[in-house]
Image: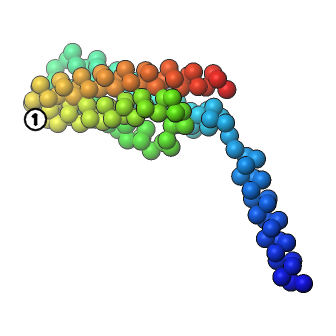
Amino acid sequence: MRIRVRLSTVATTAIATALLLTGCSSTPAEELEDWWSSGGESRVKGLSDTASQVNAVSMRPMDVWSTTCQELLAEVGKAKKLDTIPSENARGFWTEALTAFEHGGNECVDGAAKKDEPRASEGIREVQKGIGRLASAMSLIRSDLQAK
């Protein structure tokens, strides 16, 4: 009798677990909305704002470039802590933007520290490429969120 009760309990638990797992699945748009509301929006804004600042300081003397590029690198670090972006459409552009911001930010900081203006300038150009990639990602994110 005990074996029968245990088997029945195990089977009931397995069925309930399966129903919970399949019954609670989210749509891609809902997953993207969750990502957006749980940090995605603030990370996109932070990246956009600091990348724009890097672009703006490129017209000023090189001694101010490093600080702004370091701020961008800090934003990249925060963005990398987010879960993977659930939008398959935007994921590639998002990854390219983070890569460009990180590489460009590092080149900017290192070049400015060594008074190597060509290297620092190349870093800023890489950040500018990242701005375009982030804009593309944002366009696709908005489109995916509206599809909900």
Q: For mark 1, does the 10 Å Cα neighbourhood hold few (<14), some (14 to 19), or many (20 or more) residues?
A: few
Horizontal and vertical percent position of residue 62: 16, 24
- Can you tell which quarter of the image residue 16 is in? bottom right
- Can you tell which quarter of the image residue 107 is in? top left
Horizontal and vertical percent position of residue 72: 33, 32
Q: Which residue is mark 1?
A: 114
45, above or below 3, in the image: above
132, above or below 94, in the image: above
Residue 63 can be seen, yes or no: no
Horizontal and vertical percent position of residue 65: 22, 27
Residue pictured at 59% horizontal, 25% vertical: 144
Residue pictured at 37% horizontal, 30% vertical: 97
> Of residues 141 and 73, which is closer to you in this image?
141
Extreme-top residue of the structure: 59
Q: In this rendering, would 100 be left or right of 39?
A: left
Residue pictured at 78% horizontal, 71% vertical: 10
**Residue type highlighted by circle 1:** Lys
142, above or below 28, in the image: above
Residue 83 can be seen, yes or no: yes
Q: Secondary structure at mark 1?
A: loop
Q: How many marks?
A: 1
Residue pictured at 62% horizontal, 35% vertical: 28
**What colour-coding does the image apply?**
rainbow
Horizontal and vertical percent position of residue 82: 48, 42
Image quarter where the N terminus lies is: bottom right
Q: In this rendering, would 137 be left or right of 102?
A: right
Extreme-bottom residue of the structure: 1
Q: In this rendering, would 147 be left or right of 60?
A: right
